[in-house]
């Protein structure tokens, strides 16, 4: 067996015999690393998260965004995934601060009689102990908010363009129908490249007349 083969075999043996961190401090470091990786993970839903809850969240938010077509749907999915990551970061921050209340506290904090002051002191201690992780959460959240804002803008621009094009098409269809009607001609929308049915065009005419009557 070559030296490299021997080293590989040794590494495999060590990996099999390793049980991970055994001390409480070691376990805490690994837990915080997992949370840190979770904020930047390529996986949208982590193994420990509720996939059913994510599916419901994505379905409801997608419905509110009213995306149509591949490009809009892709942007809507990015918005859903980004918002999910933002929520994860906030939950992580709350969990870290909450864990501070379960850790041993100095006597001067334990003896405080004012509950609000005691809570503030405990959370301040948690911030001090986990400053690097909490700071990273805020950095990642700011980055995700920038992505969210930019993606929302792109989606709104696409939707605005789509609606404008649809309005122009229905206006042309209404004009075509009106022309054919005035000249006693048969009008078949598909022959002129319209995707609307004659009934839909007539409804557009009625809506337009109704809006004029309301002015």
Image (cartoon, rainbow, N blue to C red):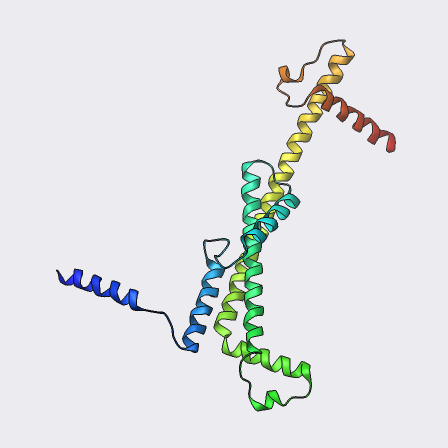
Residue projecting furthest to the left: 1
Q: Residue at x 62, y 36 (%)?
A: 161
Tell me which corner region of the image, top left, top right, bottom left or bottom right, holds residue 212: top right
Q: Which is nearer the eye, 35 or 152?
A: 35
Q: Residue at x 43, y 77 (%)?
A: 25
**x then y, percent, for residue 131:** 50, 74
**x then y, percent, for residue 111:** 63, 90
Q: Is residue 60 above or below residue 163?
A: below
**x then y, percent, for residue 46:** 48, 57
Q: Is residue 123 above or below residue 204?
A: below
**Across the whole image, how many numbered discs are drawn on residues?**
0
Q: Which is nearer the eye, 104 or 65?
A: 104
Q: Which is nearer the eye, 204 or 183?
A: 204
Residue 178 left/right relative to 122: right
Tell me which corner region of the image, top left, top right, bottom left or bottom right, holds residue 68: top right
Q: Is residue 63 above or below residue 185?
A: below
Q: Residue at x 82, y 26 (%)?
A: 209
Q: Residue at x 55, y 80 (%)?
A: 125
Residue 189 left/right relative to 207: left
Q: Assign the C terminus to one quadrant of the image.
A: top right
Q: Assign the N terminus to one quadrant of the image.
A: bottom left
Residue projecting furthest to the top: 184
**x then y, percent, for residue 167:** 69, 30
């Amino acid at each position: 067996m070559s030296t490299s083969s021997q080293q590989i075999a040794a590494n495999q043996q060590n990996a099999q015999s390793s049980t991970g961190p055994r001390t409480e401090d070691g376990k805490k470091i690994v837990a915080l690393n997992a949370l840190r990786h979770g904020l930047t993970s390529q996986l949208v839903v982590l193994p420990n998260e509720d996939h059913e809850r994510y599916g419901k969240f994505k379905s409801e938010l997608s419905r509110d965004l009213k995306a149509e077509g591949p490009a809009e749907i892709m942007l809507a999915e990015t918005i859903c995934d980004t918002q999910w990551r933002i929520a994860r970061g906030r939950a992580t921050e709350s969990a870290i601060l909450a864990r501070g209340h379960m850790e041993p506290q100095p006597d001067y904090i334990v003896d405080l009689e004012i509950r609000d002051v005691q809570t503030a002191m405990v959370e301040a201690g948690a911030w001090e102990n986990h400053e690097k992780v909490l700071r990273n959460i805020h950095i990642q959240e700011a980055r995700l908010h920038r992505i969210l804002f930019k993606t929302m803008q792109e989606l709104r621009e696409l939707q605005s363009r789509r609606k404008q094009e649809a309005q122009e098409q229905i206006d042309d269809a209404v004009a075509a129908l009106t022309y054919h009607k005035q000249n006693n001609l048969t009008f078949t929308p598909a022959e002129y490249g319209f995707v609307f049915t004659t009934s839909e065009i007539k409804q557009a005419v009625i809506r337009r007349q109704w809006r004029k009557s309301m002015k």
